[in-house]
Amino acid sequence: MNLAKARGALLTFSGALGVALVLIALIMLSLDKAPLAAGRRFLDGVFGTPSARADVVMAALPMLLCAAGLLLTFTAGLWNIGVEGQVTMGAIFATIIARTIPRDVSEWGILAALILPAELLLAMLGGALWAGLTALLKLRGGINEIFGGVALNFISVNILLSLVNGPWRVGTFPQTAPFASAALLPRHPELRLSPLAIAIALIAFGAVFMALRGTRFGLALRAIGRNAKSAGILGVRVERHILWAMIACGALAGLAGAFQVLFTRGRLLPNISGGIGFMGVLIVLLVGVRAAWVLPVALFVATVPVGSLKLATSLDSSVQIDAALGNVFQGALVLAVLIGGGIRARLAARRKERAEHG
Amino acid sequence: MLYASLRRALVVVLSAALLSVGLLAASPSAAQEEWVVGFVLVGPQNDRGWSQAHFEGSEYVKEMIPGVKTIVVDKVNPADRPNVTLEQVIENMIEQGARIIFTTSDDFGTETLAAAEKFPEVVFIHVSGSAVLEGEAPSNVGNVMGKMEFMKMVAGCAAALKTQTNSIGYLGPLINDETRRLVVSTYLGARYCYQTYRGLDPANLKFEVKWIGFWFNIPGVTADPTAVANDFFNGGVDVLISGIDTTEGSVVANQRAERGETVFAIPYDYVGACEVAPKICLGVPYFNWGPSYVRIVKAVMDGTWQSSWDWDGPNWEDVNDRDTSAVGYIFGDALTEAEKETLSAFKKGLGDGSINLFVGPLNFQDGTPFLAEGEVATDEQIWYMPQLLEGMLGVSKAD
């Protein structure tokens, strides 16, 4: 049963991938570009050099964190669209400490070792706060988490803009100064890679995976997701679980935001999230809330920006594509998977109907 | 344990990659000397503004120097490529063999210097920056900029000749030394021509700048240039001069002209920018990066290049000469023949030195003296313009 299900999911996914690829190929042909050569260059580019592979891994981490958090909320039937704002708040909260760290911390002694943990914890707090607010709006105010999330996304962006345009601005651009290296996630000497960030993300993902598989918490979330009312009747404390699922997701999203400022950009600037929260939603939708698939799909999605850049920097103009085409591909893929899932569900229903009647 | 095996795998892969890169790199360079030049653009390469001017410059390099190949990556900014950093773009270009990289936005300054430290064998040209002048740049970094101030003076002059409401608007990007000196130059040109050629009292000329906050519109981040342009016209401005990378000023002016208003626009940056709205265009002050780029690339290829801060001027014989002039001014369709003649005379005066607008007495906006009576501004005084001037409306500082 499980195997058949997995095969079905794999079929849907590869079918959708095929559709999205054909669509991109058609667009490229209409622009007089060479899709096959571009495909080769894309794969070469993404897997061909250590630095490209490192970029893919590092691009995947924040998305992985968001997706891990969203696994919890989606399992409980919550559409935590506010994840984007939770990422932003995480970035802002990490910056509260990061921007105050001086270039030279040699005299800080043991305190210097506390900088990163403090930044990361504060970032998780920021994300959790924002998610908790969405949960409270839902539980106490009766506001659906989608609407609450959208509103809080909007507010978080405006907080970010007023900070980088106002008190935190350094120089003429709306952004902070680059952070001191003591404030940043330690970086591999050659590659754009942070082993510590990888470890943190994998541990966080593993924890979510285990929680969903083998704990009462995971079981309760699943029960709530299936039917919150019956779960409540059967003794599950629905409100408390919803609150904690949201807070956990927010904390992970906040961590993703911290990665953005403490590694990817090294400073706080507008659009710091760059849509990774939404990418997390897409990943969870792509895998249909199946936790085991999140890791490979996050890596796959992360190849798109890296590979697109490889195409853009190619010497061969027949494979140079616009930055927007990568986003089109991601969107088309998700749409195709959702449509494929819908078709599959309909086919299954029809088969069941036929079996019952025949 | 896992980490150790990962690292081992990484080492194997790394050495394999290095080996293959070495093999690949060895063969073509032996056969033929091929030069790859990279150009990083902040906006779209077809923005009819700042970025397109650089794109044209890259095409000119390809055309003029045989054996040169170019890689152009546009839209390098957090809104268009949220998961891509300048560092990645530069590294990718170097992977493709780039030995000279032009980073063509003020925004790229610090990251260009960092990349230059990391890749000392590659020459980096940071356009519009002045790290070399300040002694902060490694020896493989150069700066280049065009003396746009002159052409902005012509733009200001054209606006002053045309305005009937005695009100000129300037659509400013963000506030820094560069944007201040350009808007100041525009104002000086406008004031001079208003007084000299129209015989009017410059005290009655209203000249206002509104800053949108960045070089181009980023929804939610900057003020919307379309809305700002409409505000200007609603407030009585009839000539709008653009200082931003893109063409919203011309588009809005054209819409209003089609509704019967008598309004005009002066775009910026790109030689073909008037094509957006030819009927209301008073001309365009533009950058012609080609000659500067060719000079730099050739010098690097010859081995004669040395780090320098270049502020390239126009060819006063013909400011629109594609092969020699770093900045130019194309007359727009909305100018009358008489206005064109006046502008030509003004331009000639700027060229032969008989008209110098950066001469005292000039005061800053807050009333403190900038230049004493008869004092001529040095290049550096102009480059690091700290404030707007007395008589101009608008904000001088970002805070």
Image: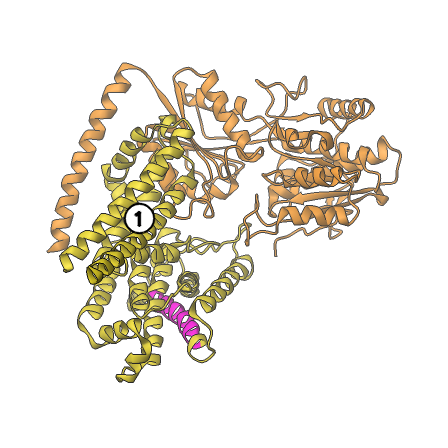
Q: Position of residue A234 (x, y in %)?
A: 26, 83
- Residue A127 part of the magenta segment: yes
- Look at the magenta stretch and give its main secondary structure: helix
Image height check: is B348 above or below A69? above
Classify mark 1: residues with Cα within 10 Å, few (<14), some (14-19) or many (20+): many
Q: Chain of mark 1?
A: A
> Chain B: what color?
orange
Considering every residue shown, the one lying at the far front of the view is: A358
Q: Position of residue B23 (x, y in %)?
A: 20, 25
How is this picture coloured? by chain
Q: How many marks?
A: 1
- Give the residue at mark 1: A301
Along the line of sight, the residue nearer the viewer: A231 or A112: A231
> What residue lies at 85% left-to-right and 32% top-to-bottom?
B196
- The kind of residue tagged 1 is Val
Q: Quadrant of the C terminus of chain B?
A: bottom right
Q: Position of residue B236 (x, y in %)?
A: 80, 47
Image height check: is A121 above or below B316? below
> Chain A: what color?
yellow
Q: Quadrant of residue A267?
A: bottom left
Along the line of sight, the residue nearer the viewer: B68 or A156: A156
Residue A261 in view, yes or no: no
Q: Position of residue B176 (x, y in %)?
A: 60, 46
Image height check: is A192 above or below B163? below
Region rendered in magenta: A119-136
- Residue A348 part of the magenta segment: no
Element carrying mark 1: helix
Q: Quadrant of the N terminus of chain B?
A: bottom left
> What residue lies at 11% left-to-right and 50% top-to-bottom?
B5
Along the line of sight, the residue nearer the viewer: A305 or A347: A347
